[in-house]
Amino acid sequence: MPKERGQKVVARNRKAHHDYTIEDTYECGLVLMGTEVKSLRMGRASLVDGYAFIDGGEAWLDAVYIPEYTEGTWNNHAPRRKRKLLLHKEQILKISHRVKEGGYTLVPLSIYFSDGRAKVELAVAKGKREYDKRQALRERQDKREADRAMSSRKHLGD
């Protein structure tokens, strides 16, 4: 069987950019069981309630939903179990200091396969207040309207 190349995105956390201000991102490996890998290869996962935390010098991913593999037997995995993240020790220390500072949390942005290996894009993020969300939405709408106006002027000039 030929080795996979490139990236294949399995799941994205679309609400993360709306709910959080993303400070840093890290690419983490993921310790999985065989049936979890097969379920991910079928493109099934949800990051909606997922979060990560540091415990005892190790990074963990929790509440990420990877459904049971349909062809699995009695040794199928639990859909919402804690999964270990693979990071360098220096990265774990840096992240844990940021989180202990206060106001920061670890949010999974996406799960994907990179050259055949399951990876998680993990973000150090700060929660947005409600008025920040409204302001970001207003800025996006204003930019979209300005782009439309510029585009329509360009088409009229042709």
Image (spheres, rainbow, N blue to C red):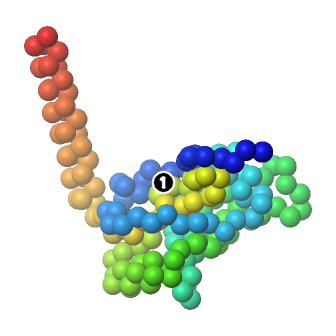
Residue 108 visible somewhere in the drawing: no
Q: In the picture provided, is 51 more to the left or to the right than 16?
A: right
Q: Residue at x 23, y 59 (%)?
A: 131
Residue lying furthest front: 2
Q: Which residue is mark 1?
A: 13
Q: Residue at x 28, y 60 (%)?
A: 130
Kind of residue at badge 1: Asn
Residue 112 is situated, as x and y percent measured from the top left of the image, at: 57, 53
Residue drawn 89% across the image and 57% down it:
73
User: Which quadrant holds the N terminus?
Assistant: top right
Task: Tell me if residue 141 comes above or below residue 48 in the rendering.
Answer: above
Q: Position of residue 48 (x, y in %)?
A: 52, 57
Residue furthest out toward the top: 158
Identify the residue at image location x=31%, y=62%.
21
Q: Quadrant of the C terminus?
A: top left
In the rendered image, is residue 77 in sight? yes
**Which residue is most to the bottom?**
56
Picture quadrant where residue 103 is located = bottom left
Instruction: Examine the rendered structure and indicate whether residue 47 appears above or below residue 94.
Output: above
- Pinpoint residue 116: horizontal percent, then vertical percent: 65, 53
